[in-house]
Amino acid sequence: MTLLAVEQLEARHGLLQAVRGVSFTVDAGETFALVGANGAGKTTLLRTIAGAHRPAAGRISFDGVDVTAVPAYARLRTGIALVPEGRRLFAGMTVKENLLVAGAYGRRGHWTLETVLDAFPLLQRRLNSRAGNLSGGEQQATAIGRALMTNPKLLLLDEVSLGLAPIAVEAVYRSLEALIKAKATIIVVEQDIGRALGVSTRVACMLEGRIILTGSARDMTREQVTEAYFGLQRARRATS
Ligand code: ATP
């Protein structure tokens, strides 16, 4: 069943067109990885799906409803949650407060303070610490936990491993694997192509605002994705 349908989406930052006519669908239960070089438009696309950035054109349907004009806070209630690049926690609030605030704004469901702490055991002993004092891995776990507290139907994860020590990346991905096994629907932006292919059911590669390659993660090779990532396919077409 299609949960998210993005059609001919365009998004701009002033005169700069960051997303150019992007269309794709995500089925319920899928993990969809979005890869691409810096500046390809992944963050803008994710923020536009979450309602944090207004599209210039196109349509976003979620769970059968056109949400293109629905503001971010209302989109959260329909079940779309974004874990933004850079985490954006309330630094002066404790981990527990960060989680509970999100819980108050979202939907009711499986995810509560208890179930989030089960999924991210590293947060248990940090519950009363201020978010600003946490390590990068702990902050990322809090940011994902905060999104889960809204009981999303679709979780958007923007570069969850950025700036983390390898051991923290492993811990975050272990928790994500548990979510994926539980059939959560996830769009994950990931710079590491191997990890993107390993964690997802489908992969899309963005270049200069467009999706230039999409397919089943099982059928795609690392080389194909790497070529698309660096725009080598296009360069090769131009010279042949
Ligand atoms: P990164 O991996 O670096 O986050 P990305 O693929 O997520 O890259 P975006 O952050 O969406 O790409 O950026 C797409 C384009 O839009 C880039 O050219 C970027 O410089 C530009 N851009 C992004 N945010 C803004 C902004 N707030 N104001 C102006 N231009 C922006």
Image (spheres, rainbow, N blue to C red):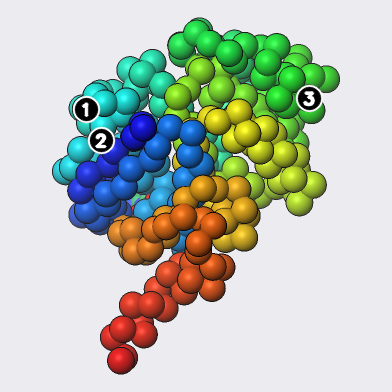
Q: Are marks 1 and 2 in contact (CB under 8 Å)?
A: yes
- Which residue was labeled with disc 1? 66
Of tags 1 and 3, the one toward the viewer is 1
How far is the residue under mark 3 from the one under mark 2? Answer: 35 Å
**x 25%, y 35%: residue:** 60
Quarter occupied by residue 20: bottom left
**x 38%, y 16%: residue:** 77
Q: Earlier in the sequence, mark 1 or mark 2?
A: 2
Residue 112 shows in the view: yes
Q: Earlier in the sequence, mark 1 or mark 3?
A: 1
How far is the residue under mark 1 from the one under mark 3? Answer: 37 Å
Q: Callout 2: 10 Å neighbours few (<14), some, many (20+)?
A: many
Q: Position of residue 43 (x, y in %)?
A: 42, 46
Q: For the residue marked with disc 3, what is the amino acid? A: Pro
Quarter occupied by residue 16: bottom left
Q: Callout 3: 10 Å neighbours few (<14), some, many (20+)?
A: some
**x 22%, y 53%: residue:** 21
Q: Position of residue 46 (x, y in %)?
A: 39, 41
Asked which secondary structure carries label 1, the reply is strand
- Which residue was labeled with disc 2? 60
Q: Earlier in the sequence, mark 3 or mark 2?
A: 2
**x 67%, y 19%: residue:** 116
- Which residue was labeled with disc 3? 121
Q: Callout 1: 10 Å neighbours few (<14), some, many (20+)?
A: some
Q: In the rendered image of this protein, does residue 166 appear above or below residue 55? A: below
How far is the residue under mark 1 from the one under mark 2? Answer: 6 Å
Q: For the residue marked with disc 2, what is the amino acid? A: Ile
Residue 139 shows in the view: no
